[in-house]
Image: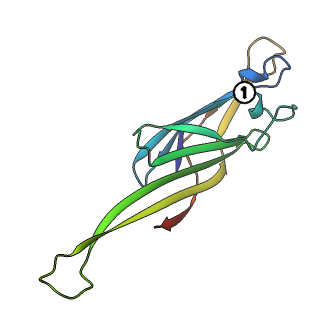
């Protein structure tokens, strides 16, 4: 998986934490599909009571294929991004196991579900933004990040 165009804004002030957000594009080269991922709210900000580094956010899959779903979670205290994408592939094959050529072969359908899950640190550069004394940081991704994922399959 490749993470591109990442932007993170973290505001740990008491009145601004809900303004925090993360946005990036997730590219799955195995199936050639992009997903637009974003999340917002105080759960992204470490060190405050609303912080939740285990909250999953859903991504919009650009192909609109309902057999593909993508999600992520972000731990700002570690700058760790975890991505999860699942997709399904359906195929059919001829079954001629009966051994009689004159008989019509039957089609056997096979559905395989793939899940790709992985985590890595984001290569970002952050700077303070806003008025002097502001607690808001804006971080931008300095290069595309490849996240190594483990792909598991389940066939039905």
Instruction: Tell me which colouring the rendered structure shows.
Output: rainbow
Q: Is residue 117 left or right of residue 67?
A: right
Pick whichever, 120 or 126, lies toward us: 120
Q: Is residue 139 visible?
A: no
Question: Dot 1 lies on which element?
Answer: loop
Residue 123, x across and y down, in percent:
64, 42
Residue 113, x across and y down, in percent:
48, 60
Q: Residue furthest front?
A: 103
Count of number-bearing discs: 1
Q: Residue at x 84, y 15 (%)?
A: 133
Q: Residue at x 33, y 63 (%)?
A: 91
Q: Is residue 85 visible?
A: yes
Image height of 132 relative to 63, above or below: above
Q: Residue furthest top?
A: 131
Pick whichever, 110 or 27, lies toward us: 110
Image height of 29 relative to 41, above or below: below
Residue 11, x across and y down, in percent:
77, 23
Residue 20, x across and y down, in percent:
71, 25
Image height of 14 relative to 34, above or below: above
Q: Residues within 10 Å of mark 1 (few under 14, many from 20)?
A: some
The quadrant holding residue 30 is bottom left
Q: Is residue 115 left or right of residue 50?
A: left
Q: Residue at x 82, y 16 (%)?
A: 15
Q: Which residue is mark 1?
A: 41
Q: Residue furthest left?
A: 102
The quadrant holding residue 79 is top right
């Amino acid at each position: 998986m490749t993470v591109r165009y990442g932007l993170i804004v973290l505001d740990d002030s008491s009145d601004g934490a809900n303004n925090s957000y993360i946005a990036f594009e997730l590219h799955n080269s195995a199936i050639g599909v992009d997903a637009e991922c974003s999340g917002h709210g105080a759960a992204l900000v470490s060190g405050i009571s609303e912080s939740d580094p285990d909250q999953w956010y859903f991504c919009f899959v650009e192909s609109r294929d309902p057999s593909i779903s993508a999600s992520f979670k972000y731990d700002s205290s570690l700058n760790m991004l975890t991505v999860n994408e699942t997709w399904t592939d359906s195929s059919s094959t001829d079954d001629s196991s009966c051994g009689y050529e004159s008989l019509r072969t039957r089609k056997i359908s096979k559905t395989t579900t793939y899940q790709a899950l992985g985590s890595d640190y984001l290569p970002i550069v952050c700077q303070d933004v806003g008025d002097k004394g502001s607690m808001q940081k804006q971080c931008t991704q300095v290069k595309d990040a490849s996240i190594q994922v483990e792909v598991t399959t389940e066939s039905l």
